């Protein structure tokens, strides 16, 4: 088994409700280092793009706002039994968020904030070959509030590719 691996996550999403729509895309590559046969750690990056659309009652789009967020993270994984693992990470993100007033209503603008996100949870790894695998993770965001960039639960799909010997 190789000591190093590329750990790449990606996400796509779309939702629509009552004249409000959201398209999301994200990429989060990381470099993993196996410390032993059960424990792996590593640094990573994260990038997220969101496009918010606002429509009137007849369905015509009246406004659109795009945001981008860039961050750095560290992660740790511990394989408990067979393909089941515990996953934890901490992400520091420079995030663009939709601006809201004191009553929680959208103002039509964007604000930029630095957000720290601690995540932890369980995962399952499906091994495809000696060099490739895929994970599904169910994580809890311990900082899930109005400044959060991830709502609970956080579900992730990641691909793992061993590099080197």
Image: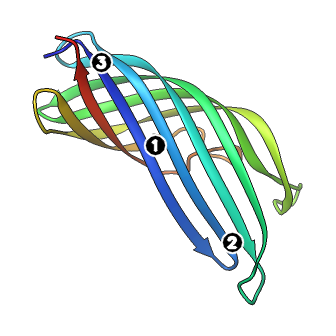
Q: Residues within 10 Å of mark 2 (few under 14, many from 20)?
A: some
Left or right: 135 as drawn, with respect to 93: left
Pointer 1 or 2: first along the chain: 2
Q: Is residue 83 above or below residue 152?
A: above
User: Which residue is at the front of the view, 99 or 27?
Assistant: 27
Cα gap from disc 1 to disc 2, whole angstroms: 26 Å
Q: Residues within 10 Å of mark 3 (few under 14, many from 20)?
A: many
Cα gap from disc 1 to disc 3, whole angstroms: 20 Å
Q: Is residue 154 visible?
A: no
Picture quarter with the N terminus: top left
Q: Is residue 3 above or below residue 162?
A: above
Please tell me which residue is depicted at 58% across the width and 60% down the height of the picture: 23
Where does residue 42 sit, x and y in percent of width and height?
40, 17
Residue that sits furthest to the bottom in the current view: 58
Left or right: 36 as drawn, with respect to 112: left
Q: Which residue is mark 1?
A: 140
Please tell me which residue is depicted at 63% across the width and 33% down the height of the picture: 70
Picture quarter with the C terminus: top left
Q: Is residue 40 above or below residue 136?
A: above
Q: Are marks 3 and 2 in contact (CB under 8 Å)?
A: no
Pointer 1 or 3: first along the chain: 3
Q: Are marks 1 and 3 in contact (CB under 8 Å)?
A: no
Q: Is residue 119 visible?
A: yes
Q: Which residue is mark 3?
A: 40
Q: Is residue 96 above or below residue 42?
A: below
Q: Quadrant of residue 59?
A: bottom right
Please tell me which residue is depicted at 28% across the width and 21% down the height of the picture: 5
Where does residue 150 sit, x and y in percent of width and height?
56, 46
Q: Quadrant of residue 56?
A: bottom right
Residue 20: numbered disc: 2
User: Which residue is at the front of the view, 132 or 16?
Assistant: 132
């Amino acid at each position: 088994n190789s000591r190093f691996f590329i750990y790449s996550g990606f996400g796509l999403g779309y939702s629509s409700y009552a004249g409000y729509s959201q398209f999301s895309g994200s990429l989060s590559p990381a470099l993993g280092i196996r410390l032993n046969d059960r424990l792996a750690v590593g640094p990573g990056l994260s990038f997220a793009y969101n496009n918010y659309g606002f429509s009137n009652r007849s369905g015509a789009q009246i406004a659109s706002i795009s945001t981008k967020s860039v961050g750095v993270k560290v992660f740790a994984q511990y394989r408990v039994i067979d393909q089941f693992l515990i996953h934890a990470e901490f992400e520091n993100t420079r995030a663009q968020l939709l601006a809201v007033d004191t009553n929680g209503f959208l103002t039509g603008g964007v604000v930029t904030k630095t957000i720290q996100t601690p995540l932890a949870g369980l995962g399952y790894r499906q091994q495809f070959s000696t060099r490739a695998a895929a994970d599904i993770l169910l994580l809890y965001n311990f900082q899930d509030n109005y400044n959060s960039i991830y709502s609970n639960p956080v579900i992730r799909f990641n691909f793992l590719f061993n590099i080197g010997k």
